[in-house]
Image: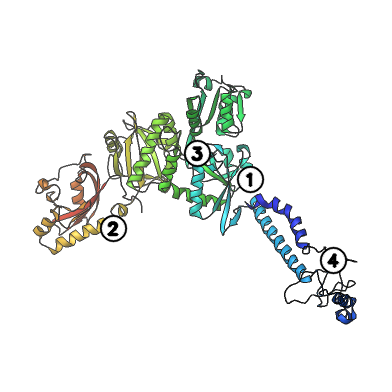
Amino acid sequence: MVSRFLPLLLALAPAFAARCMQPAAGLALPAVRAGNAPPDECISRKKTKDREDEDENEANGKEPGQGLPRSRNVPIPYIRRDTGFDTNSNFLSPSPGVGVLVCHRCMMKRIVWITVFIGILAVIAVFSAGCLSGKTAPAGVTAGRPQYVIGVDTDYRPFTYRDGQGNITGFDIEAARWIAARKGFDPVFVDVSWDDIIPALEQGKIDMIYSGMTVTPEREGRVDFTRPYYVVNQSVAARTGSNVSMQDFHAGRLRVGAQAGSTGAAWVAENLVRAGLMPAENLVLYPGVPSLAAGLERGEVQAIIGDAPSIRLMAGEKSFTLIGGVPTGERYAIAVRKGDTRTREMMDDGLSQLMKDPSWNLFLEKYGLGAAGSGGVPVRGRPETTEELKTYVDEAASFALSHGRDAAIAAFQDPDGPFVTGDTYVYALDYSGVALALPFQPGLVGTNFLPLRDATGKPYTDIEIRLARAGGGFILYRYPEPSENGTSRLKISYVRPVDDTCWIGAGIYTDEDVLIDPELREFVNNAREYALSHARDDALAAFNDPAGPFISGDLYVFAYDYNGTVLAWPYRPDQVGKNRYNETDMMGSYHVREMIAKARQGGGMVDYYSTNPFTNRTALKVSTVVDVDGSWFLGAGRYIEPGPLRLVS
């Protein structure tokens, strides 16, 4: 901001200095004359010609020094024209032969003001130089807050553009302001043409690029990128009624328009021009999206290619028709100068916070970027709750349905794509158990997982397929974690169908201490203490009371003896007294036998599928059991359903 006003301030400086040097109204600005301190005779009013002049004035009825500016109660000094000093030893500046006096005190005040003004200009110049230098420090400081200059292309709706009043707005702009507010800096948005935006960053004219920039290997050699925040493909549009097709496009028979410096232009150059399918002159480059649209409207080109959200928005407003797309799976990220780790990490953390905040969904909805058919998919923060995990998978399914199976599988398989967040990733299989997408195990794509079991013997793929066919659900099993060199860990996944040919899932690696949280553990321990301090029948009566003290939210106590006979089940009194040793849950698990084994060992966690009495739905339940007195045990657990239940510590 300060650099914008620097030329104006520098232009005004001479005029300001000249004005400060002028005497008060009616006084001429005399030439400055150097000299030493006046001799004693100059101080004596009786020995100077000035005294004679004063006597003459008094004789004519005039006040001494009449016509000169004066301050109240301050004697007016007199000056010897040959020395430049007054009677109070103040330096004055008379013009030779001119009977005009200038007060030295006034002159000194003006000199002070000039010094202050020059100092202000120096400070402004320093901050402006910082804006234009190649250093990684923020552009300036306003009211104690650092200032970052953000380069944007205002021809790129809905990410960065100007509204009807000329204000820069859009999805990226609102996201940048949200991050700036939490990170304590002031964002300054500067409109830069797309061809010039990376050079502007390299030259230090801007501090970052936040304007729908795709991560490419070429750009990664010049700038550093944050984590991706949105993923798009390329869309191709033609004039409505023109009868051109994607077959014409891929055959190189069309004259195609693209924005200069865009990934769409790069794709056409690489896959059509360099492949010899299309003459180079048939790729027409335009400086921005509006001029690109105008070129298609005027008939300069037969089709245009660009990032799907922008082209789809354009097609909805003009007489254009989307004729197809190119599944490029491009990742948008914020670009910073090469080596500017501080800014990159700050914006990385800001994006992570935003993606977990409700504002992220509000921004996506406001700019039409979150729904199927938007042409892209937002990158999510790492899911941490059962609700977030389900949403993570649901959005991947929406992407697959709107972009097609091949594009979706390619996106899911990309370890740097939008469906990988840390050690959480989307995987895809068909209903026979054959892997279609495993981003961290590409060598296992095509493998049939149906016969496989985890370290505990659980047929996890078979269970996942059953859940997917039933509409979706959670599963707990052990699976190799990519970030720990394939070490087998507990993983809780949510799976759901995409269509009748394939299903997808994603999971969070977790621990028993997270699933058996302190509240649940304390609930079970309190029940055990109650059982030990009361007669068995009294304790079981309390446990079987659906309105008793051992019902807390969705928690309740159940109890068995070591033969597998039910002793307490408050919501299934019909089961009390029955032996369930040989019964299985809906997935074929002998969970009562597993409970008995864990209780004999002192206690532990058991997972199985059971009907939730509060929702009347069958769901995964994770319980902890503990021995009471060697003849029976008790336990309690949580149903794993979409909600606020945290899956990570």
- Residue drawn at x 16%, y 55% is 633
Judged from the image, the secondary structure of the residue bearing numbered disc 3 is strand
Q: Real-space Cα distance between discs 4 and 3?
A: 68 Å
298 w.r.t. 631: above or below: above
- Residue type at mark 1: give it: Glu
186 left or right of 453 in image = right
Which residue has dot 4 on it? 32
Which residue has dot 3 on it? 331
- Residue type at mark 2: give it: Pro
Judged from the image, the secondary structure of the residue bearing numbered disc 2 is helix
Residue 202 bears which disc, if any?
A: 1
CB atoms of marks 1 and 4 within 8 Å: no
Judged from the image, the secondary structure of the residue bearing numbered disc 1 is helix
Q: Earlier in the sequence, mark 1 or mark 2?
A: 1
Q: Real-space Cα distance between discs 1 and 4?
A: 50 Å
Place of residue 102 in the rendered image (x, y in percent of width and height, measured from the top left): 81, 68
Front residue of 596 and 246: 246
Judged from the image, the secondary structure of the residue bearing numbered disc 4 is loop
Q: Earlier in the sequence, mark 4 or mark 2?
A: 4
